[in-house]
Amino acid sequence: MHPKAIWPYHAFLLVNADIPFGRRTIGIFGVGEPLMCQLFIEADASQWQSQTHSLRIDGVVTSIRIENHFWSTLTEIGQRDGMTVSQLITRLWHESMDADHDLGNFTSFLRVCCARYHALIAAGEISPDLSVPIADHPAKKILAREQARRNLRIN
């Protein structure tokens, strides 16, 4: 029987085996096929649990609910420039408003900031050395290189 023919009923009936270099599946996805998502599904589950923090922006109390992974990342970003998470979030809010950004979903903006932070470190644009402030990086040059890379992918 073709694997797609049994899909909804038996897709999760897989036999797993521990072998060198990680777990591999035996089942409808093929014998010895690696579990592609193992790095994600076996990570610390507390990372994707949400937590709410309250803070004041211009004297107005607001609550932000995002996953612990993002709180950790925001903490790291803030610490690099000597700020608390509340100070960092307030600064992101003010600078975004000054740039006329529509922040209808501010928590999404914060998640994207965190993803960009990690991506910029991975790309070598931001130093992984946590003692180097984010403000010490040449933002305009980094943004120009990012745009050039996007243009290469589009064209």
Image (tube, grey):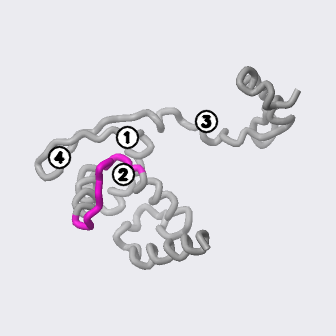
Amino acid at pointer 3 = Ile
Count of numbered marks: 4
Amino acid at pointer 2 = Leu
**Is the N terminus in the top left, top right, bottom left or bottom right quadrant?**
top right
Mark in the foreground, 2 or 3: 2
* Quadrant of the image occupied by residue 52: top left
Q: Which of marks 2 and 3 is nearer the N terminus?
A: 3
Q: Which residue is drawn at 54% across and 70% down?
A: 150
Which label number is shown at residue 110? 2
User: How far from the left and from the top, in percent, is residue 125?
Assistant: 50, 70
* Quadrant of the image occupied by residue 29: top right
User: Within the magenta stretch, is there residue 101?
Assistant: yes
Q: What stretch is highlighted in magenta?
A: 98-111
Spatial separation of the CA atoms under disc 1 and disc 2: 9 Å
Q: In this view, does 65 lie to the left or right of 86?
A: right
User: Which residue carries the number 4 mark?
Assistant: 56
Amino acid at pointer 4 = Arg
Q: Which of marks 1 and 4 is nearer the N terminus?
A: 4
Spatial separation of the CA atoms under disc 2 and disc 4: 16 Å
User: Which residue carries the number 1 mark?
Assistant: 66
Q: In this view, does 128 lie to the left or right of 72?
A: right
Mark in the foreground, 2 or 4: 2
- Can you say whether 63 is above or below 95 in the image? above
> What kind of element bears circle 1?
strand
User: Which residue carries the number 3 mark?
Assistant: 41
Mark 1 touches mark 2? (CB < 8 Å)? yes
User: How far from the left and from the top, in percent, is residue 37?
Assistant: 66, 40
Residue 17 seen: no
**Is the C terminus in the top left, top right, bottom left or bottom right quadrant?**
bottom right
Q: In this view, does 93 lie to the left or right of 2?
A: left
User: How far from the left and from the top, in percent, is residue 109?
Assistant: 36, 53
